[in-house]
Amino acid sequence: MDAQALQQYYDNSPRVRRLALLALCLILIIVSMSLSAINIAIPAIGDELQVDAEALSWIPTAMLWGNVVFLLPVGRLADRYGRKRVFAQGVMLFIVSSALIIVTQDIFMLLLVRVLQGIAGSMVYGTGLALVGAIYANSKRGQALGIAGSSVYLGLTMGPLVGGWLIMHLGWRSIVWAPALVACLALMLLYLFIKGEWRSKQVPPLDWQGLALFALAVTMFLVGMGNIEQPVYFGSVALGVILFGVFVRHQLDRENPLLRIRAVRDNRLLNRSLLAAFFVYGSSFSMVFLLSMYLQYIHAMTPIEAGQIVMIQTLVMMVLSPIAGRLSDKYEARYLSTLGCVLFAIGYLLMSQLTSDTSISYVIVIVVVVGLGFGFFSAPNNNAAIGAVPADRLSIASALINLARTMGNMMSSAAVMVLFTVILGNVAITPEQHPKLLQVIEIAMLLSACYVVIAGVFSYRRGLTH
């Protein structure tokens, strides 16, 4: 059926539309849960594979590399070949790459699995919001995006809880292969409930040169940041920054660029939403990773106990995000998301004061405040960005939102790698190293507080959505 008939089909079938949203959200939960569960397994992986703190910091970064590099081409390919098709292929790649964990025996193979999972995640995240935006184009889009956003963060924060249980009963590898089994069921639901396909009639060819430049820039930057204590790697960081500048110049000169920088620059509502997302997610990515390490190393919690604490954040966000999304259908998104930025800043400042004697009640207050921040920020910000582009460019908008998220994550991950390298170095995290771990947490959280202040400025200055 054509685009108009497809839209009418969903507008006239609220039950089908809800089931389609359910299928999408289930996949977002499973993929997100698998990608984040690895954080709770860091101590177990370090013990079994005999790797140091510096190498362990690469585990989240490897996934980010695949995510960041492939998000832009995924948006373009989805517009050409179909959003549902690319989304489904991303789920398939996630299943296959997760199965490789069974034969993983060293850190290098584990990092390869994480890269493949990152690519799969880019295909899922880069088209998921576009599918939700298309299905709910004419009604309750903000609420639907809020539910989808809650699904992502439900998965991300369920990861440590479910992962902790799996580690204790089935070993750390199970946190990778077990979600893939559920993803097989979710893939069946996707084809059962989501009918039709969304693609644009005229899509320019993919800019392979731009993609190569972008991938090389990201690689050189991350490699340099991961080894920043060695002077020679300053050159790698500098080369990454220079290559990114070359990429921007290349995109401005291309007739059909990978990223239409001028179009994004001229769309104030879109670019301010993307910048706010970049700094918010740049502030938040390291929090779960560091909090998990804090609870397990310093408070000697089991993975399950640590996961239960971290899970509180998502429970708060799950309740609030759809409400905030629905409010953003009626009221200005900038007020809601800026309030979220303020709450983030409070939470990060509280976390920067953690000590070895800090009570668990204090930690719970932190995760509640940050959960409130996510709830107020995520859905209104996404709704503003999705609503700022035409219907035939939703895949690109979805990819840009997730690119802003993953680029922010990459910035945060790079900063944490530097802190681990400079402060902890290539040693195992023993009780003697706990004061240094607390120092890493303090500096990382103060940086995160600065990031969200910048995000709040961009959020408030984005302009009117209604």
Image: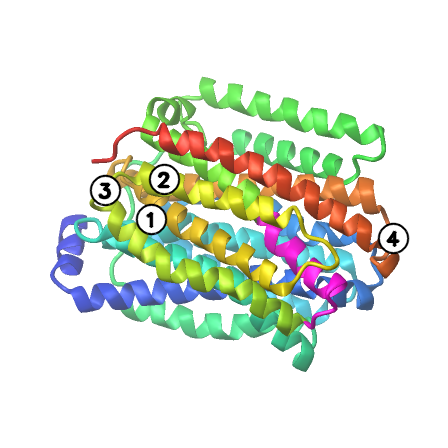
Residue depicted at x 36% and y 55%: 321
Query: Is residue 258 covered in magenta?
Result: no
Residue that badge 3 annotates: 331
Instruction: Say which of marks 3 and 2 sits in front.
Output: 3
Q: Residue 286, position in %: x, y?
A: 62, 49
In this view, 297 is above or below 348: below
Residue 109 has which mark? none
In primary-sequence order, the first of circles 3 and 1 is 1
Which amino acid type corresponds to the residue marked 4 in the rendered image?
Answer: Val
Q: Quadrant of residue 277?
A: top left
Spatial distance from mark 3 to mark 2, Cα to Cα? Answer: 21 Å
- Asked if marks 1 and 2 touch (Cβ < 8 Å), the reply is yes
Residue 204 or residue 425, whichever sits in front: 425
What are the residue bounds of the magenta stretch? 285-302
Q: Nearer the viewer, mark 4 or mark 3?
A: 3
Q: Amino acid at mark 2?
A: Ala
The location of residue 278, given as percent across then percent down, is: 49, 37
Q: Which residue is mark 4?
A: 427
Residue at (42, 58) in percent of width and height? 317
